[in-house]
Amino acid sequence: MPDITKSQNTIELTAAPEDAGQRLDRWLAQRIEDLSRARIQALIRDGYVSDGETIREARTPVKLGMTYRVALPPPVAPDVVGEPLPLSIVHEDADLIVIDKPAGLVVHPAAGHASGTLVNALIAHCGDSLSGIGGVKRPGIVHRLDKDTSGLLVVAKTDAAHQGLAEQFKSHGRDGRLFRSYLAFVWGRLPLPKGSINARLGRSQANRMKIAVKRGEAGRLATTHYEVVKVFPGERPTGDISLVRLVLETGRTHQIRVHLAHIGHPVLGDAVYGSGFRTRLAALRDAVRIASSKLSRQALHAETLQFEHPRSGKKLKFNSELPEDLRRLAVAFEATEKANKKRL
């Protein structure tokens, strides 16, 4: 192992015999746990790594006995302003923070949402505990939830945590480290108690703001697994509603919403992918119809989030109960179902 010396702004590493010949960027990233390989490459490119002379080539081979010095410039201020917005914090440590996001909160600033986002709130809340994602003092967003989807979201506070979490989300649970499940109220009865939806997704040619199912080899592979939790009968069959638990095998934009609409069971309240189903409200029982008509967003909630802590390796699991608007919907369904059973 190399000899490592750390100070507040520099790290010095002396190469051991087994290190000789390795790529410098890979060698440094393996030994400096707080910096990702991408960050190391940027530091080399910007002239912050030296062996007595400045090194600017990431593929430079490591030399036996050579001491390499990595200067750590202070992270620059983000171009997003922090705002003291309320946050529902489920877990926080030096590396990451888990948020139970309410519906209506945009995750990242974008056109039309320059402020009032989760990122604005996290910059204000985390302050100096943000050590610099890619050299910028900002939270590391590794996955997102749509504005009107509620539930659990994990955000990195350090460069190393950002890299570790991003790797897990890239595999989407195939390596056993990550698990995510969602709950959704959807129109109708699904064809099977459990199953999978496989349909390639890409930008709609008719409306670039929407995602659409693509035919042939167009679009990107996308798989959603579902299991029916409960079916709530309507006044007529067209008013049946199902509570469904969903697990993603891939993480495409709007994946759950598009997949469910594709098989004819869009998410209740989805104004983009299920807008034509509002005409079915009349087929719902009274209490359910009233609760559903008050729903101002898609009835989709990120219920469970499990991942491996990027520093300790410990498995962390979090669960989020249905928020108030969806809980009112569930209560209306349950009450209507009980009343119907009494009549029978």
Image (cartoon, rainbow, N blue to C red):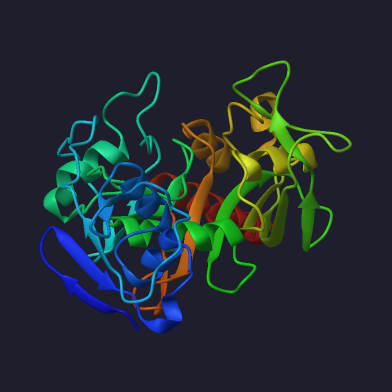
Q: Position of residue 273 (x, y in %)?
A: 66, 30
| Name of the residue lying farthest toward the top | 206
Residue 225 located left or right of residue 100: right
Residue at image location 77% in from the left, 41% down from the top:
200
Query: From the viewer's perspective, is residue 255 above or below residue 271?
Result: below
| Name of the residue lying farthest toward the right | 216
Q: Position of residue 37 (x, y in %)?
A: 42, 57
Residue at image location 57% in from the left, 36% down from the top:
289
Res. 3 image quadrant: bottom left
Q: Quadrant of the C terminus?
A: bottom right
Q: Quadrant of the N terminus?
A: bottom left
Image mark count: 0
Query: From the viewer's perspective, is residue 253 above or below residue 327?
Result: above
Query: From the viewer's perspective, is residue 193 above or below residue 250?
Result: below
Residue at image location 24% in from the left, 45% down from the top:
122
Residue 307 in sight here: yes
Query: From the viewer's perspective, is residue 338 above or below residue 128?
Result: below
In terms of depth relative to the viewer, which is nearer, 123 or 85?
123
Residue at image location 27% in from the left, 27% down from the top:
115
In terms of depth relative to the viewer, which is nearer, 120 or 160?
160
In terms of depth relative to the viewer, which is nearer, 303 or 96?
96
In terms of depth relative to the viewer, which is nearer, 156 or 299?
156
Q: Position of residue 245 (x, y in %)?
A: 62, 59
Residue 6 located left or right of residue 291: left
Residue 321 in sight here: no
Q: Position of residue 297 (x, y in %)?
A: 49, 34
